[in-house]
Amino acid sequence: MKTVVIWDQLDADLKFFVVNGDLSWFNRKYLNSFDLSDDEQSELNSLVYEEDGTIRVKFRSDFPTEEVVQGARVIVAGFLP
């Protein structure tokens, strides 16, 4: 199972990345929001960013349609500045 993440940073263009596993429970979850526990914040943060703040995932500017056709789940998650 794979998950396509639509990464939303409010005023920035949407970006996309694909990860292995079912991360559907992160759907509609945002870093810096009040609805995530500290552990969930850490997990989502470490999914996208290295400890030094560099980006861990490979963002794409085009939607990965081929992954969805092959059965990937699709979620929206992001970062609130």
Image (cartoon, grey):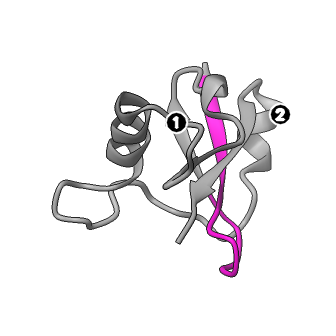
Q: Is residue 69 left or right of residue 26?
A: right
**What residue is pinned by disc 1?**
36
Q: Main secondary structure of the magenta part?
A: strand
Which numbered circle lies on residue 55?
none
Give the vertical position of 59 relative to 6 (above or below).
below
Q: Residue furthest front?
A: 34
Asked whether residue 47 is drawn in magenta, I would say no
Magenta stretch, residue numbers: 2-16
Q: Is residue 13 left or right of residue 69?
A: left
Q: Is residue 59 left or right of residue 77?
A: left
**What residue is pinned by disc 2?**
69
Asked whether residue 9 is drawn in magenta, I would say yes
Please rate how many residues cluster around mark 2, counting C-alpha atoms within 10 Å: few if below 14, some from 14 to 19, many from 20.
few
Q: CA distance from mark 2 to mark 1?
A: 30 Å
**Position in image of residue 16 (x %, y %):** 64, 57
What residue is rendered at 18% in x and 54% in y? 51
Q: Is residue 54 left or right of residue 17?
A: left
Task: Give the foreground label among 2 and 1.
Answer: 1
What residue is rendered at 33% in x and 55% in y? 49
Picture quadrant where residue 57 is located:
bottom left
What residue is rendered at 36% in x and 35% in y? 38
